[in-house]
Image (cartoon, rainbow, N blue to C red):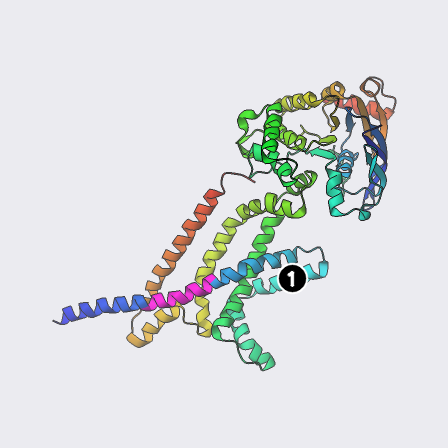
Amino acid sequence: MSVLEVKDIKKAFGKTEVLKGISFSLEKGEVLVIIGSSGSGKTTLLRCLNFLETADEGTISVDGKLLFDGDMSSLSDNQIRENRLHFGLVFQNFNLFPQYTVLQNVTLAPTLLKKNGAQEIEENARQLIKRVGLIEKLNNYPCELSGGQQQRVAIARALALNPDILCFDEPTSALDPELTGEVLKVIKGLKSKDSTMIIVTHEMEFAKNVADKVIFMADGVIEEMGTPQEVFDNPRSPKTQHFLSKSMEEF
Amino acid sequence: MEPLLNAVKGKFMFLSVTLDLLRGFYETFKVFGLTLLFALPLGLVIAFGSMSKFKPLSFLVKTFVWIIRGTPLMLQLIAFFYGPGLLFGMRAMPRFTAVMVAFVINYACYFSEIYRGGIEGIPRGQYEAGQVLGMTKSQIFFKVVLLQVIKRIVPPMSNEIITLVKDTSLARIIAVYEIIWNAQSYIKSDGLIWPLFYTAAFYLVFCGGLTLLFGYIEKKLSYFRS
Ligand SMILES: Nc1ncnc2c1ncn2[C@@H]1O[C@H](COP(=O)(O)OP(=O)(O)OP(=O)(O)O)[C@@H](O)[C@H]1O
Ligand SMILES: [Mg+2]
């Protein structure tokens, strides 16, 4: 059974239809990369999955459980919060909590949600911070870290709640080019049989490398979906071909 | 003999003026302290009102803040003291009460704008980061946003509070005997002008203390950047 099943998600802001019916499914342990030109609705899709935005229509199911049936008004605040916990989101501009140290950033949410005992939470946080290579920065504040380091902390913070599906919205676009490598390496290192990820990125090399499945979005629809070989090496849609050749030029 | 007597009298005078001004400054301090005590929380209520998603409420509150901030405090003092009598034939409030009402409302409106700026200045990403981590609204406000708001509002708050120290002298408009009133009375009774200028020392010492206090708070919060 798929871990994530998204059906016919639609979303409009006023009169502009941003998502015009997005459907896909994801198996446990799969990495889905979403590419597409600016304004095609990638961020909006991730925000709908994380319930930061309410889709107008469509359904979202995780592990066979229907989280969203096209009608948010039937969901209480608490249910929305519970639904969110199935997903994690790493933002383009990190959004670390500036008044907390690296360790506190990672332990805050699990502590507030009483996920575990304080000791276990801290032990788990230390391990995650070590995993993203920042154990020596444990007690530093975000303003004392580089962008790449901050993004790695944000990844550890998202992992601390052990989400079923971890989403990344252009995790390296706010970084200097020389810092993107360290973050991409960490993300790639997360790939394992039980971590399911959705990554929106403009880093085509990385996308090709890490993806099990690729979606190319254009104007609010899935223009093309397939394996990295299919989408990157033999794109069928003219729009995909055009987009890929343009991003190769930039490269 | 004469100069000695004058010297003794002068010393005595200085002491008695000092005591008298201290008494006046106690009134000044009362206006200051009570205004803060009530206007700080009331300002937060007004701020939430003006940020309300319920448009009529926010419109009403914003209009009220506009009127209060757009007219002189001196006029408001007079209005609160004489207004009820002139308009409705009611008995005037006690002078001190009228002063407190005018000061609290006036400063609450100024504070509300500072709070609003502080709260609205927090990037939306901070709320969203809390949301995707499954925090409740109140957890986000108290654990994520509040300290960042406090850090942002300390500098404008300290300005406003130091202005309040000096604004207290307006209380004498409706004959509340604060420090300047006391000092001025020496002009008529003894023909002395120096007590009036002597009040500056009281203000300076008090504002100096406040400046140090706010500097300390700012420094305490300088460990992070938001
Ligand atoms: N809150 C909003 N209100 C109105 N319009 C919005 C809102 N959020 C997004 N949009 C619009 O929706 C469209 C899709 O935006 P979205 O951010 O999802 O694109 P994207 O694919 O993530 O683009 P990029 O690659 O630039 O990040 C854009 O035209 C944008 O202007
Ligand atoms: Mg985007």
- Return the residue found at the far left: B1
Q: Is residue B157 left or right of residue A19?
A: left
Amino acid type indicated by mark 1: Val
Check the picture and name the quadrant holding the N terminus of chain B: bottom left
Residue drawn 33% across the image and 64% down it: B197
Q: Quadrant of residue A97?
A: top right
Given residues A57 and A111, the one toward you in this image is A111
Say which residue label 1 marks.
B61
Given residues A108 and B29, the one toward you in this image is A108
Check the picture and name the quadrant holding the C terminus of chain B: top right
Q: Quadrant of ligand 2?
A: top right
Q: Quadrant of residue B20?
A: bottom left
Q: Is residue B105 left or right of residue B21?
A: right
Which portion, as a residue range, is magenta? B20-33
Given residues A23 and A249, the one toward you in this image is A23
Q: Is residue A156 magenta?
A: no
Marked residue chain, label 1: B
Q: Position of residue B214 (x, y in %)?
A: 45, 49
